[in-house]
C-alpha cells in the first residue's frame, strides 16, 4: 500500500508575463502545510516537462538520489546532474504563485498556458503543446498495449 503523498488530477494553469505559475487553490494547501509554501521545481528525467515537489517529498528524492553509486556509475551521475542540478527552491507568494526560473521554462517550452498534473508524489508541469503531443503518444501506446495487456507482467492483474 502506498503511504506517501498521492497527488492526482489535471488542471489547466497559466503563467503571467513574469513567469509566475498560479497554483490552483486546491493544491496550495499541500505546499503551505508541507513546507511553509515552499516547493522544488526541476527538470523531468524522461519528458519535456517540469517536476514540482512539495518540500517533504523533495527530501525523499534527495535521500534516494544520494544513495546512488555516482562514483562508479555514469548513469547515476547523469540522473543526479539532471534532477539535482536543475532543482530550484521556490516560494509561493501571497497570491499562490510560484516564479518559475527562465531556464526551466525554456527547457520545458512553457510560456503562457500549461497543464499541472498530479503524479503520485509530485506534479508534472507541461506546456500546452508538449502536453498535447504526450497525450497523443500515451493514447498510441495504450492502443498498442491493449492488444497484449493480459500478458504484461505488471499489468496482468491490474484492477482499475
Image (cartoon, helix red, strand yellow):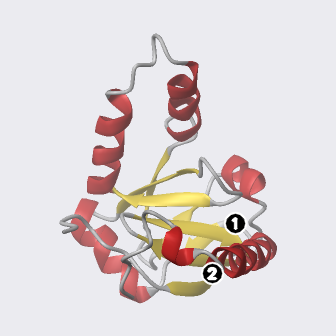
Q: Residue at x 61, y 83 (%)?
A: 13
Q: Callout 2: few (<14), some (14-19), or many (20+) C-alpha neighbours within 10 Å?
A: few
Disc 2 is placed on an element classified as: helix
**10 Å crowding of disc 1: few (<14), some (14-19), many (20+):** few
Q: Nearer the viewer, residue 96 or 86?
A: 86
**As drawn, is 12 to the left or to the right of 153?**
right
**Vertical order, 42 against 16 (above or below):** above
Left or right of 138 in this view: 5: left
First of labels 2, 1 by sequence position: 1
Marker disc for residue 157? none
Badge 1 marks a residue whose secondary structure is loop
Left/right placement of residue 122 relative to residue 77 reads left
Residue 118 x/y as whole percent: 46, 75
Quadrant in which the C terminus appears: bottom left
Residue 65: % across, % down? 38, 34
Quadrant of the rendered image containing residue 28? bottom left
User: Which residue is disc 1 drawn over?
Assistant: 18
- Judging by the rendered image, the residue that carries numbered circle 2 is 146
Residue 68 image offset from top left, x and y in percent = 38, 26
> Do tag 2 and tag 1 residues touch (Cβ < 8 Å)?
no
> In the rendered picture of this protein, how many numbered marks are placed on residues?
2
Amino acid at each position: 500500500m502506498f503511504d506517501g503523498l498521492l497527488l492526482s488530477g489535471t488542471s489547466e494553469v497559466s503563467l503571467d508575463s513574469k513567469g509566475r505559475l498560479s497554483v490552483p487553490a486546491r493544491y496550495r494547501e499541500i505546499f503551505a502545510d508541507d513546507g511553509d509554501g515552499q516547493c522544488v521545481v526541476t527538470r523531468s528525467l524522461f519528458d519535456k516537462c517540469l517536476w514540482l515537489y512539495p518540500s517533504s517529498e523533495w527530501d525523499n528524492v534527495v535521500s534516494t538520489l544520494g544513495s546512488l553509486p555516482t562514483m562508479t556509475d555514469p548513469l547515476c551521475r547523469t540522473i543526479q546532474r539532471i534532477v539535482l542540478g536543475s532543482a530550484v527552491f521556490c516560494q509561493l507568494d501571497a497570491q499562490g504563485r510560484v516564479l518559475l526560473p527562465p531556464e526551466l521554462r525554456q527547457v520545458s517550452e512553457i510560456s503562457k498556458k500549461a497543464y499541472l498534473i498530479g503524479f503520485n508524489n509530485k506534479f508534472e508541469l507541461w506546456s500546452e503543446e508538449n502536453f498535447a503531443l504526450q497525450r497523443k503518444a500515451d493514447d498510441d501506446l495504450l492502443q498498442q498495449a491493449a492488444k497484449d495487456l493480459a500478458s504484461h507482467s505488471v499489468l496482468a492483474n491490474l484492477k482499475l
